[in-house]
Amino acid sequence: MNAALQQHLATAAISLHGVGKRFDALEVLRDISFDVGQGEIVALLGTSGCGKSTLLNIVSGLLAEDQGHLRLFGDTAAAFSDWRRIAYLFQEDRLLPWRSVQANIAFGLEGAGIAKAERDQRVAEVLRLVGLEAFAKAWPHQLSGGMRSRVALARSLVVKPQVLLMDEPFSKLDPQTRSQMHDELLRLQALTGMTVLFVTHDVEEAVVLADRVVVLEPRPGRIRAIHSMALPRPRVPTEPAVSEQVRRLRLEV
C-alpha cells in the first residue's frame, strides 16, 4: 500500500471498496465503493429493497461483507477493535419500558463496565445536550415521540462515539417533530464533530442534513450517483435552492 493510499484511508472514518452481499441466492449489494470523511454527514438514499439497511449493518459490524472490503479509521473490519467508537441509532427507539430515562441512557455504559460515578456524569451531560434534564426520572410511556427520539439519541451519544450510524430514526415522527430532530442532530454534530452515516428514503431529509448523498438503485443495491450538497446551513425546504435540489434528486430515486 503506497503512502498516499495509507493517508487517504487514515483520514476516512469509513471506507468501502467493492462491497457486495448475498443472502443465499439473493444478491443484495453489488460493488459498493465510497468513503465517509471524519466529521462528514452522508446519507444513503433509495427506495425500499436497495440494500440501505444491509449496508449500514455491514458498517456497524453486525454483518460481514461477502465481496470487497470495509475499513474503519484505516483498519480492516477484522482488525478494527474499538467498536465503542461507533454508535447505532435504529428506526425504533428501543427504550426499555421498565427503566427510567436516565437508566435507559446509562444502559450501554453499564455493559462496558464504566464506574457509576462516571456513568452518572456522562448521563447528566447528554441529558443537558438534548434538553431533557427535567425528564431524567420519567418513564418511556410518559414521553412524546419526539422526546423518546431524543432519549434514543442521547443513549447513542453517551458512549462518546466518533461515528453515528442511523437507520431512518425519525421516519415515524410527525413533520414538525422530525424537523426539530433534524435541527437537534445538526447542532449536536457541530458540537461533537462526529461522523454521521444515515439511511433514508426521504429526499428532503437527505438534502437538509447531508454533506453528500449516495443514491442507491435496487436489486441488487448499486450506487447510481453521489451528490455533494453545496448548500449553506440551515437548509429550509421551502427555499428555492433547497427545493430545486430536492426536485433533482427525486428524479433519480
Image (spheres, grey):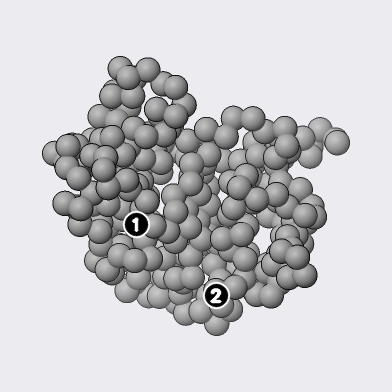
Specify the quadrant that holds the N terminus.
Answer: top right
Residue 236: image location, x then y, percent: 33, 66
Q: Amino acid at mark 1?
A: His
**Residue 247 drawn above or below residue 133:** below
Quarter of the view holding residue 120: top left
Specify whether 208 is left or right of 58: left
Confirm or deny contact between disc 1 and disc 2 (CB under 8 A): no
What residue is rendered at 23% in x and 39% in y?
A: 100
Question: 79 or 189, which is in the foreground?
Answer: 79
Mark 2, secondary structure of its residue: loop
Q: How many marks?
A: 2
What residue is rendered at 31% in x and 53% in y?
A: 149
Disc 2 marks which residue?
Answer: 47
Mark 1 vs mark 2: give the one in front. Answer: 2
Q: Amino acid at mark 2?
A: Thr
What residue is rendered at 75% in x and 59% in y?
A: 20
- Can the viewer see residue 126? no
Residue 12: image location, x then y, percent: 64, 41
Residue 189: image location, x then y, percent: 40, 43
What residue is rendered at 36% in x and 40% in y?
A: 155
Q: CA distance from mark 1 to mark 2?
A: 21 Å
Q: Residue furthest right?
A: 1
Specify whether 20 is left or right of 104: right
Q: Residue furthest left?
A: 134
Q: Residue furthest bottom?
A: 251
Disc 1 marks which residue?
Answer: 182
**Residue 75 drawn above or below residue 241:** above
Q: Can you tell which mark lies on residue 172?
A: none
Mark 1, secondary structure of its residue: helix
